[in-house]
Image (cartoon, rainbow, N blue to C red):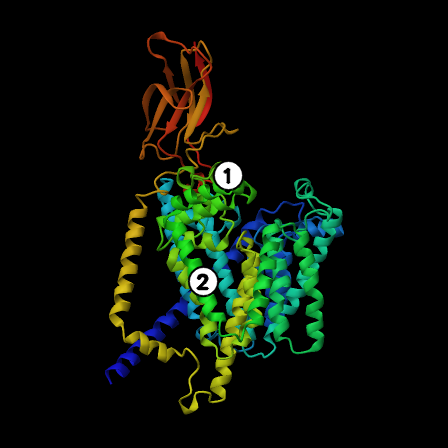
Amino acid sequence: MALDWRMQMSMSKGYILKKSCANLGFAISLLVSFIIVFNQFESLKGLDPFYRITIPALCLAFSFIVSTINLRWGIIACVFALPLLPNLAWQIQQHFGYGRILSLHNSGLDLVAGLFLGGLVNQWLTNKKISVKSSFPWQLGLLMLVLTASVFLAIARNLHQTASPFQLSSLLYNVLHLRSIGWHDDYRPLVDWVVFGCAASLIYIVITALTSLHNRNEYIFKPLIISLLIAAYVGFKQSKYGMGLSLDQINFRVDRFGYMALGFQHDIHAFAGQMLIGAIGLWGYLYYAKSIQSKLFILSCIPVFWIALFLSKSKSNFTVAVISLVFIFSIWMFRRSRLLLPVLKPAVFFFVVVILSVVFFHDAWVSSLAKLTRYFELPDLDAINFKLSYRPEVYLAALKFFALYPILGLGQSEFYRQSADHALTNSYYLSINQNGENAHNYFLQTLAETGLVGIAVYALLIFYPLFRIENRRLLIPAGVALGALFLGNIFAHSMLVRDNLFIAACFIGLMYACLKGEQTSARSADFYSNNKEPKFSASSAKVKLLKHPYLIAIFTIFVMISAFREIYTSFRSVPFLKDVQCFKERKLDADGWTSGVFNVAIPQGARGITLNIKGTQPYVTKRPLAADLNIMHGQSRRIQSSQILFNKDGPYQISINFDRGAVADDEEYRAELRLERCFIPRNLNINADGRRLGIQIESATVNH
């Protein structure tokens, strides 16, 4: 009796929590869609008169109109368009000669927002009730809540890092000008928030439209196959003629098979990631196809995608594809063997142990690998690192970030920004050469940015249908296709091209549509009669959990305390203590603004330097700006130093000279002005300028 009462209370609370997650997730998706619409107004107001329209505006209008008329047509049109969007305007100009359509990045956002809003209008016009609970998975709502928290935590840390005050007007400005936000900007996480909000809305629409259909796979795979064939055809022409490639792309990896193939992408790995869907992902669709004609069509398409994948010149993705194909067929051949699971489980466990050991004992790994290379007379680790396009050192940096903040991570969208800190990454390629980059492994980057909590919620969303559905064969087409798309993100990050992420969202939505469809059929057929329950039923799982309530409570409290401690200490810990971009020296800008560090050479025979300063930073009367003016010799030897405090608006004249009438006796002397902080005009709602600005210098005069 006590257990039954406890179960009823638990189920009641669980229902409320799930409903709340679903409703909040739906509200975030709706808000994000309206944000995309408002961004269109700002974009079109500033459109160059030469251009007639932009690709995002066309996508928004087209998908909204089509989905308003017929939601399933809208899904077909959206799936067809996604692989073609990134470089569509350029390809139209190359093939048809019309160049008055402006291409903007992340056009898929507008396509999905139009589909979502049009779908809601369609439901309203057809008098269908918008059922958030049944069509918006609570797991997806939970993910959106976690990502929302991660985004605003990341923004708070960024503002702390750049010593910028929070202003609501600045937040609104950045929300309405998303496409002008740079990779190092404090409000960059907003872009990812909008992206994932659109992905959630796409999952919802796919579930809503396809749950009641038995041929739901056709609505996703057929338009996708046709679109990928078009992309492959364009890739073949690029490989043979170099049509539509830039000068750098034409000279990249040219061999007897021709030029690189990009299709409609800007990057070979993004194109290869799409071709992996056709080369590997279609095997699941082939398995589930009913008619001979469909099977023959799929079989005829798969070799085309393999050729396009090879012509992309993405060696890593082609290698992964071959290994994956061998693995899939091995699993298929031994699927009925009793040894399959006993072999796979230790292999997965060993892989996890290796990854964790690299995280916590990376120095020992580097030392051991160095000894092995010397023992077997192999090239040294630096040569191997270079041969692998610096992937090992980038992955090691990602694991270091994860070790710093394992519970909640750096914050969504933070890897690119924080990886510019060489003192933290110890990666010349990542921090100095690239001034920050993505991790070239989407999953490692997600782990570093969202931590174990984020990874757990992602895993819950993706794998939940697998454990809840009775007929798991229904998931094979979408599951295999999703896995194929994931393969393109092991040695690259094709889903950072957000149109590919939206394709993944379609597959996830299709998986949930299969689950919801089976549950609906089961209820209508009185499936649960005679006390028959599906595998991994919720009730049995809850009974098992309720047997150990104290362990659950202890674990939850431990995670919450660890997360709170991580948040609290992060504002006083690396990498959030210093704004690396502010203190990276750069040449004086055309308008005279410096960064946080400015150097000017002191010629031989000079006594010092005088700086005529035209302007300082805003609000220096309220927040005085401290600075050090030094005479340096060589890289780091300080000869003379003076402290300066800017506490009023300019102009200023500051100077520094050698002591006792001494002069520079060689050409290695320089005057260095090092400021306490920079300011960012965009953060203060002054204009769209995202530069780190120090002071504005009118001239520098040599003192003789």
Left or right of residue 181: residue 1:
left
How far apart in space, not on screen, are marks 2 and 1 (Cα)? Answer: 29 Å
Packing grade of label 1 (10 A; few <14, some 14-19, many >=20) is few
Q: Residue at x 48, y 59 (%)?
A: 196
Q: Is residue 209 above or below residue 313?
A: below
Q: Quadrant of residue 162?
A: top left
Q: Position of residue 286 (x, y in %)?
A: 64, 71
As rendered, which of 261 and 700 lies closer to the eye?
261
Q: Position of residue 234 (x, y in %)?
A: 71, 54
The answer to whether residue 165 of the structure is visible from this angle is no
Which amino acid is tagged 1? Asp
Residue 348: image tag: 2
Q: Position of residue 77 (x, y in %)?
A: 64, 65
Circle 1 SS class = helix
Query: The C terminus appears in which quarter of the rendering?
Result: top left
Q: How many marks?
A: 2
Q: Is residue 702 above or below residue 479?
A: above
Which amino acid is tagged 2? Val
Circle 2 SS class = helix
Packing grade of label 2 (10 A; few <14, some 14-19, many >=20) is few
